[in-house]
């Protein structure tokens, strides 16, 4: 088998099967990142690269924060690992309390995971288990939304609405999906669009089809992230909340991207003014420095498990990961959320979101741009496709940007932007200048 080597690192590149990567293209033209500082990366060929996506939406406070490095080092010397099952350590309780405080009233009990994908699985199992313990075991069907992304495990791809992530893998869970809210009449809207709240009413139709007695939960992202930054239409999430209440269906918000600052408020729930029964987090929880996720649930859900768990030495929820509430992840989470509060990162986003919006919408008339969307410090451009090759142009533009010193995320027919919350206005403008040049170069 051919072995690709890079003069940069001197290692063979074939051993590593890279996730969500065009491995053949990458290994022909590697893009190696060797360092980071603030909102910049350093490439192996010594260039400073503007980080247009806070890593993968996870490093809002900027890279290489010394507070996080110190918290991790100290924890590794004090308590490296403690069993997650049947024993506890202080920082897991402290971090749970912090998450209770940061999430809206009504979200009070925290289950720890190690990623957004695990948060999805955990939340779906909580929803099904809740109804079974309430004496309604038929309520198992899960409703997602087209273009939704909930990670890559079997539950996540079942409720997810991105066909490319599901079609290789055969049978999935019993689900159905709401329509997405990316409407042609809303193209080039700044922030939340006017049209589309009525799409939430499709839940009534799904209830008519499946019956509420068979539906456990609806899961949506407050704004769809990976599907191409799709802000919810005005009133849409409120309507979904009302319909879930009407039909006795749990509402799950997947806040893996919206969690902790991205919208310009602490959570998407807070920003959009709608409280779900369950909220899923990951990414920004530790500023990306250590893998960690969390699922925060209502007292009604938690108390139902407690009340139906049998003798009090029995496990109420047979679920958990070896690394749930890992001490080092908890130390990182506490330190990251301390930075989040101290530096008012949500407030920083709220203050700079208008400038971000002006900059990204400045690209509306550039070649190939079919749509521009934004909310908080998140934005996307939809680009005109080559015939039969929707994913090619974003890839080409992103490669051009990488050569000019900007890391920009591309996926499907979009380019996506999610800078660090601390990025200054000048570099936000610079980021979109580079993209503008790239679009003209691609014309
Ligand atoms: N839910 C949501 C809403 C997400 O955005 C996950 C679950 C899964 O999290 P993990 O930690 O298992 O990856 C995500 C992750 C992108 C991009 O470019 C988005 C994600 C991951 C990587 C890239 O939009 N979202
Ligand atoms: N597979 C085997 C054989 C295991 O023993 C375990 C955990 O004990 C797992 C998978 C699950 O690993 P984790 O708890 O890290 O998700």
Image (cartoon, grey):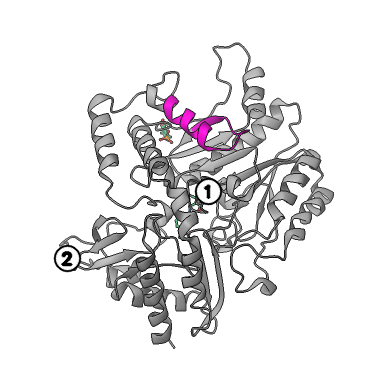
Of marks 2 and 1, which one's residue comes earlier in the chain? 2
Q: Name the residue located 17 percent from the left edge and 61 percent from the top edge.
A: 9
The answer, for residue 1, to whether it is visible in the render is no
Q: Nearer the viewer, residue 301 or 223?
A: 223
Where is the C terminus found, in terms of image quarters? Answer: bottom left
Using the image, determine if residue 241 lies above or below residue 42.
above
Is any atom of residue 263 visible in this view? yes
- Camera-side residue of 180 and 23: 180
Q: Residue 94 in magenta?
A: yes
Q: Assess disc 1: are there few (<14), some (14-19) or many (≥20) residues with their C-alpha within 10 Å of its C-alpha.
A: many
Find residue 41 and report its horizontal and vertical position in percent: 27, 61
Which residue has dot 1 on it? 265
The structure residue drawn at horizontal position 51% and vertical position 37%, both measured from the top left corner, is 102
Task: Give 352 or 369, whichever is nearer the viewer.
Answer: 352
Q: Closest to the observer: 232 or 81?
A: 232
Q: Position of residue 391 (x, y in %)?
A: 49, 74
- Label 2 and label 1: CA atoms lie apart by 41 Å
The residue under the point 44% across, 60% down is: 418
Please give the range of residues in magenta. Answer: 93-111
- The residue that disc 2 covers is 8
Q: Residue 93 carries which label?
A: none
Q: Which residue lies furthest to the front in this view?
A: 351
């Amino acid at each position: 088998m051919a072995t690709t080597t890079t003069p940069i690192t001197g290692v063979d590149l074939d051993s590593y099967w890279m996730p969500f990567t065009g491995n053949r293209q990458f290994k022909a033209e590697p893009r190696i990142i060797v360092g980071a500082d603030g909102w910049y990366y350093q490439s192996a060929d010594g260039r400073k690269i503007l980080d247009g996506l806070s890593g993968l939406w996870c490093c809002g406070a900027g890279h290489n924060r010394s507070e996080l490095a110190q918290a991790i080092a100290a924890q590794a010397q004090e308590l490296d690992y403690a069993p997650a099952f049947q024993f506890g350590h202080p920082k897991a309780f402290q971090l749970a309390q912090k998450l209770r405080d940061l999430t809206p009233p009504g979200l009070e009990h925290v289950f720890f995971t190690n990623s957004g994908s695990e948060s999805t699985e955990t939340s779906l199992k909580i929803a099904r288990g809740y109804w079974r313990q309430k004496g309604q075991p038929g309520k198992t069907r899960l409703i997602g939304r087209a273009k939704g992304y909930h990670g890559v495990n079997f539950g996540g791809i079942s409720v997810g609405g991105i066909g490319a992530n599901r079609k290789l893998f055969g049978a999935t869970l019993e689900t159905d999906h709401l329509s997405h809210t990316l409407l042609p009449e809303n193209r080039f809207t700044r922030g939340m669009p006017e049209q589309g709240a009525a799409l939430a009413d499709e839940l009534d139709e799904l209830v008519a089809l499946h019956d509420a007695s068979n539906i456990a939960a609806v899961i949506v992202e407050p704004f769809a992230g990976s599907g191409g930054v799709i802000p919810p239409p005005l009133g849409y999430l409120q309507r979904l909340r009302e319909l879930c209440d009407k039909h006795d269906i749990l509402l799950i918000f997947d806040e893996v991207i919206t969690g902790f600052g991205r919208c310009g408020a602490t959570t998407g729930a807070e920003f959009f003014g709608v409280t779900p029964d369950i909220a899923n987090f990951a990414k920004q929880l530790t500023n990306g420095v250590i893998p960690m996720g969390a699922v925060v649930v209502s007292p009604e859900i938690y108390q139902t498990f407690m009340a139906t768990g049998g003798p009090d030495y029995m496990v109420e929820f047979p679920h958990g990961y070896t690394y749930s509430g890992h001490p080092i992840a908890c130390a990182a989470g506490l330190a990251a959320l301390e930075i989040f509060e101290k530096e008012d990162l949500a407030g920083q986003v709220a203050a700079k979101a208008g400038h971000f919006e002006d900059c990204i919408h400045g690209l509306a008339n550039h070649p190939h741009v079919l749509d521009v969307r934004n909310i908080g410090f998140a934005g996307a451009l939809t680009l005109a496709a080559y015939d039969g090759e929707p994913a090619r142009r974003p890839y080409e533009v992103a490669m051009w940007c990488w050569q000019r010193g900007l890391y920009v995320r591309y996926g499907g027919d979009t380019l996506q932007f999610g800078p660090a919350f601390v990025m200054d206005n000048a570099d936000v403008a610079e980021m979109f200048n580079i993209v503008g040049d790239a679009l003209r170069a691609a014309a």
